[in-house]
Image (cartoon, helix red, strand yellow):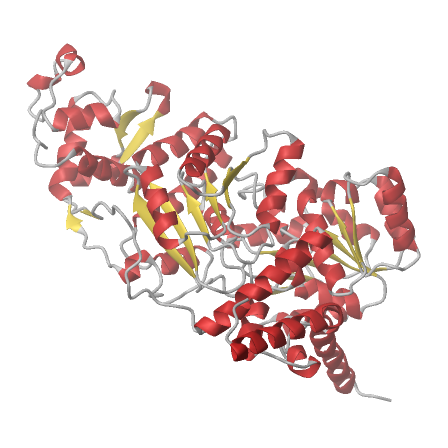
């Protein structure tokens, strides 16, 4: 009788062979092998792993190893089609069950599930919890349940979905079926909430590093946001695919139209669009190269596009979780990518107003304020942004060398005197005015409003004439972020002093501030990820041929280009130039099914390119 150890070794070998044959990867990364082994043998798991870290394999491989169908709970219907298409390219029998299917199509999927003809089934949470769907699942053999984007269960989180609260019923109705919950965004508080809400008390928790070393974080002071964005796109990301996040629907459309007028292929996306146009814009972004989408946070959850080279924010998100989730859509392929944001006083005031004026409970407002304060700390830090970001998720790290504050360390200045003047001006004007009025007083700016209130007679009038308006806006923004000043939205944005300001006014506390950061342009000595290798001009020519072939193939099949072959695979092909099946099979990301489907075409392109170069002809 084989020992438990030998059985586990055999199971591990099966998993590794399946990884190579189906997915074309030589080995598992980080904790993937442990997670796969645990779930494949019937264990429950909570997996916290960064976007691009390979979460999907943690349930796809066990689903293929176990008997029955793996049921994947996914919150975004629009992306299921691409997820299923990617699996089908690998030869995996996958389908989705959601409201986009008509009755006949849905019935066909349901029959395939009951008949054991599916390896993976993607279902939206609101559909899965319906009695009819649960009855259907009980008639089928289920290999496992994978609950993707598990942070949606947290009522304190940035992306709460009420329907996720009902998913604990899976434990009650399918007690013998292993469950794996996965998320890329969960601070310690959210993790603690996920476990009881999904009845995962007995689950093993796997926490990978939240670090995305290929992403460069840059935050600049908002001076002329559109001009700053345009310079960032044209100088650093010309022709690249990316996402620009805005707070309002109107702003997304206006920004997209403006970018188009500047020669950039830009589309907009928000929840208020008609369904057909919204679907068209998302499909174009997924399936075409070099598209920039200007969007609200309605766009992006679960975006699988691997070659998003940047995520830009024109407005401040609500929390570090939201920022991390949104910026995490960049660089999923592991190649260098940028997370760039403009940030100003108006952002701070606006987000504070949203919290204060919401109908939420006092407890929810308190938590929201704490989350916003943590994000403001990230924006205002003069130290490494990555250290600050990762510490929020409970992870210690060293300065990264790949964020703006590491590459160009800011020289903080002693803002004690300026802070005292600002706090005094707020107090002397009666704590009844917004920042612009108080700045006008400090700079000695005359006008009808100043005269009407008699503020030109105050001893603080003109006391700050040595600083420009933008510098004062920088001071007031940081005073609010540091908690010395609060905005009273019940009084039209009036600034009020907090108890924390008292030591500063009394001269008992020093205040250090960051200077205005205008551009945030990359230094020429910017670091690169270790696995990035430059191609020769000849290899680059071949890479372009391969991409053109991939575009045509994707278009004919109606799927995103990356579903055919990832950029990393094409780059490796261009460098290695395989001329036979064995050599092509050694390329990462090419499993047995893709080798069968595309091997002949790819080898033919390599041979054709070699022949052209030998004869001196051009493609």
Give the camera-side residue of 75 and 1: 75
Quadrant of the image for the C terminus? bottom right
Image spot of residue 194 (x, y percent): 62, 51
Residue 378 seen: no
Residue 569 seen: yes
Image spot of residue 415 (x, y percent): 15, 44
Quarter of the figure with residue 452: top left
Residue at the spot x=58%, y=29% of the render? 272
Relative placement, left or right, of 61 versus 316 is: right
Give the camera-side residue of 237 and 376: 237
Residue at the spot x=53%, y=42% of the render? 158
Image spot of residue 273 (x, y percent): 60, 30
**From what the image shows, is residue 366 above or below residue 55?**
above
**From what the image shows, is residue 41 above or below residue 419?**
below
Residue at the spot x=18%, y=40% of the render? 503
Residue at the spot x=18%, y=38% of the render? 471
Image spot of residue 516 (x, y percent): 22, 45
């Amino acid at each position: 009788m084989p020992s438990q150890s030998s059985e586990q070794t055999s199971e591990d070998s099966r998993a590794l062979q399946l990884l190579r044959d189906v997915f074309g990867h030589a080995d598992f990364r980080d904790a993937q092998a442990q997670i796969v082994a645990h779930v494949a043998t019937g264990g429950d798991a909570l997996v916290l792993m960064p976007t691009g870290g390979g979460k999907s394999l943690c349930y796809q491989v066990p689903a293929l190893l176990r008997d029955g169908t793996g049921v994947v709970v996914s919150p975004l219907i629009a992306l299921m089609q691409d997820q299923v298409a990617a699996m089908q390219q690998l030869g995996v029998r996958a389908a989705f069950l959601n409201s986009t299917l008509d009755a006949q199509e849905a019935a066909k999927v349901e029959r395939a599930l009951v008949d054991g003809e599916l390896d993976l089934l993607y279902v939206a949470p609101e559909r899965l919890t319906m009695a009819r769907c649960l009855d259907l699942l009980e008639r089928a053999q289920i290999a496992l349940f994978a609950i993707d984007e598990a942070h949606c269960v947290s009522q304190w989180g940035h992306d709460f979905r009420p329907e996720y609260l009902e998913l604990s019923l899976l434990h009650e109705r399918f007690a013998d079926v292993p469950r794996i919950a996965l998320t890329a965004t969960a601070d310690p508080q959210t993790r603690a909430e996920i476990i009881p809400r999904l009845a995962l008390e007995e689950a093993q928790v796997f926490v990978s590093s939240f670090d995305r070393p290929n992403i460069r974080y840059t935050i600049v002071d908002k001076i002329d946001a559109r001009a700053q964005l345009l310079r960032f796109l044209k100088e650093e990301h010309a022709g690249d695919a990316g996402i620009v996040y805005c707070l309002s629907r109107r702003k997304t459309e206006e920004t997209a139209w403006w970018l188009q007028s500047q020669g950039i292929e830009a589309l907009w996306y928000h929840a208020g669009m008609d369904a057909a146009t919204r679907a068209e814009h998302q499909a174009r972004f997924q399936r075409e190269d070099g598209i920039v989408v200007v969007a609200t946070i309605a766009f992006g959850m679960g975006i699988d596009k691997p070659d998003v080279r940047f995520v830009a924010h024109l407005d401040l998100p609500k929390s570090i979780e939201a920022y991390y989730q949104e910026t995490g859509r960049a660089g999923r392929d592991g190649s260098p990518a940028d997370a760039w944001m403009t940030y100003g006083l108006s952002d701070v005031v606006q987000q504070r107003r949203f919290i204060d004026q919401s109908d939420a409970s006092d407890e929810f407002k308190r938590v929201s304020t704490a989350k916003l304060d943590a994000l403001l700390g990230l924006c205002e830090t003069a130290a490494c942004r990555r250290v600050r970001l990762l510490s929020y998720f409970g992870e210690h790290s060293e300065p990264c060398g790949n964020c703006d504050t590491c590459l160009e360390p800011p020289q903080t200045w002693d803002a004690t005197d300026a802070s005292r003047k600002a706090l005094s001006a707020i107090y002397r004007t009666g704590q009844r005015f917004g920042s612009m009025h108080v700045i006008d007083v400090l700079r000695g700016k005359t006008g009808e409003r100043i005269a009407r209130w008699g503020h030109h007679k105050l001893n603080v009038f003109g006391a700050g004439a040595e600083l420009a308006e933008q510098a004062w806006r920088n001071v007031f923004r940081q005073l609010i972020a540091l908690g010395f000043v609060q905005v009273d939205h019940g009084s039209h944005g009036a600034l009020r002093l907090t108890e924390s300001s008292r030591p500063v006014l009394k001269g008992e506390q020093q205040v250090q501030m960051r200077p205005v950061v205008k551009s945030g342009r990359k230094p020429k000595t910017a670091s690169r990820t270790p696995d990035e290798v430059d191609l020769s001009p000849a290899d680059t020519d071949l890479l372009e041929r391969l991409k053109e072939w991939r575009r045509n193939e994707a278009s004919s099949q109606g799927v995103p280009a990356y579903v055919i072959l990832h950029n990393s695979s094409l780059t490796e092909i261009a460098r290695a130039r395989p001329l036979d099946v064995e050599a092509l099979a050694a390329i990462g990301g090419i499993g047995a099914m893709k080798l069968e489907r595309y091997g002949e075409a790819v080898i033919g392109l390599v041979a054709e390119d070699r022949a052209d170069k030998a004869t001196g002809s051009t493609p």
